[in-house]
Amino acid sequence: MKYIFVTGGVVSSLGKGLTAAALGALLEMRGLKVRMQKFDPYLNVDPGTMSPFQHGEVFVTDDGAETDLDLGHYERFTSGSLSRANSVSSGKIYEAVLEKERRGDYLGVTVQVIPHVTNEIKSRIVRGGEGVDVLITELGGTTGDIEGLPFLEALRQFQLDVGRENVCFVHCALVPYIRAAGEMKTKPAQQSTAKLREIGIQPDVLVCRTERPITQEMREKMSLYCNVPVNAVIECRDVEHSIYELPLTLAAEHFDEVVINRLGLQAKPRDLSVWENILSRLLHPEHSVKIGVVGKYIELQDAYKSIYESIIHGGIANTCRIEIKRIDSETLENGDISPLADLDGILVPGGFGDRGIEGKILAAKYARENKIPYFGICLGMQISVIEYARNVLGLKDANSTEFKPDTEHPVVDIMEAQKSIISKGATMRLGSYACVLAQGSHAKSAYSEDVIRERHRHRFEFNNKYLDALKEAGLRIGGVNPDSHLVEIVEVENHPWMVGVQFHPEFKSKPSKPHPLFAAFIKAAIAKKEA
């Protein structure tokens, strides 16, 4: 069993997650079984209660864990399906330690960071790597952050526990271009590596995040000062077109070869054909469409990260260039719907709270009346139900009790199992559930299966009291959960492609395997544009 630990220095948002994910992809291309894991130093037990403005989207696993968005990168770049064991925060570690202390597991000794907290962290590494050849663990934050020190200490100890020959430390550091000086500076990378070495960790590979090419002289300088072999100083420049170029650009730097040699792994020759095909489809499209994403966190790129990537995957499936137009739903609420006029498809993503809701309803109405392909996800499905009930069924007060608790027609209502829940963390309907697809539905056509499983994250649901009335008015039920009989998919019958799903298909889409619904949505958008 081999272990790779990815750390970052100088500043946050260096792309450690993407670097780790791309390395995982490269190792898989060499026939190795890889799993990925994220350590987050924050004290929240998980990001489930954190604002998207603070932390971006919450990624959900099959087993219902609410995790960091980097797990989305891991699943998109590699073949594995991750679980709650692969997302570990300081809060989760301290929670486990304190539970053990309360049970008396420590037999009355004084509970301390060393060894109790570090032992708990190390146990998560061992658990996370069971059954694979290589475990890649990314440590969030920046080297030197006080919250991250117990994790770094645990990694220092772990290399002694399992043997230095079984561990590879990859350190990502910034090599900035200083425009005023007209040159690139290696000092930040030197300083962050020195900080790591003070803690007792010697990096084996230095990944240099940079805007411009790194010269051989700079590689030799960083090799000398950071105590890293010259061939292990890896240039990681900003990619030109897509993050899916990253495996190819890092392969050109022999990143995977350096790691394989360091760990003494037996691996097959590299086969990059999957990633070359993905990039070819991206760079040589046969079609192009403009997709509007109507949401409330539009100004923050990471809030809808999986949505944006899945739309791109739908483009890959159809060899189509995608232009994504971000539309703040609040801007539509004054009645000006001109931002929707040039779109080939409209997508309304998930979310919580009543801000911007009426703008989303207007977007769904515009898509229905103008026969524009519409894809509603989670809240986006509920929006389409509210819009249909108001404007087709004639229930003018139709709403969700999330936004208007006293509405006369609660076509969307809180789930019965949620009504007595007070705690907010990890209490929604979370994880993978079955859905039986209806014959003749767009969903059945897209999946070509009778029963599917998709990931959920919601408290409110389609109110079955209005089921018959909405069906008679032309709303088709495309899928239902076989156990709870909750409506999972709704479709508008007299429309080219208007589909709403209660689940989150974006969490299962990969560039190498685009999600069927996103592929079908983009196909419908192409047909609309070319009609």
Image (tube, grey):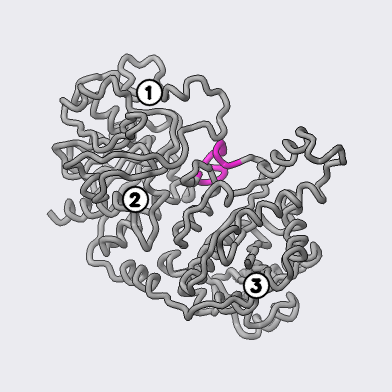
> Looking at the rendering, in which quadrant would you find the C terminus?
bottom left
Front of the two marks 1 and 3:
1
Q: Position of residue 39 (x, y in %)?
A: 64, 52
Q: Which tag, 1 or 3, sits closer to the chain's start?
A: 3
When the figure is inspected, residue 166 is found, relative to residue 296, above or below; the finding is below
Helix, strand or loop under label 2: strand
What secondary structure is marked by label 1?
Answer: strand
Would residue 362 be found to the left or right of residue 202 on screen? left
Q: Are marks 2 and 3 in contact (CB under 8 Å)?
A: no
Q: Which residue is mark 2?
A: 325
Q: Nearer the viewer, residue 446 or 413?
A: 446
Label ID, residue 271:
none
Is-magenta flag for residue 37? Answer: no
In the picture, the quarter occupied by the N terminus is: bottom right
Q: Which residues are magenta?
A: 46-58
Residue 413 is tagged as 1
Say which residue appears at 53% left-offset and 68% top-offset. 23
**At 79% from the left edge and 35% from the top edge, which residue is drawn?**
104
Q: Name which of mark 2 and mark 3 comes first in the sequence.
A: 3
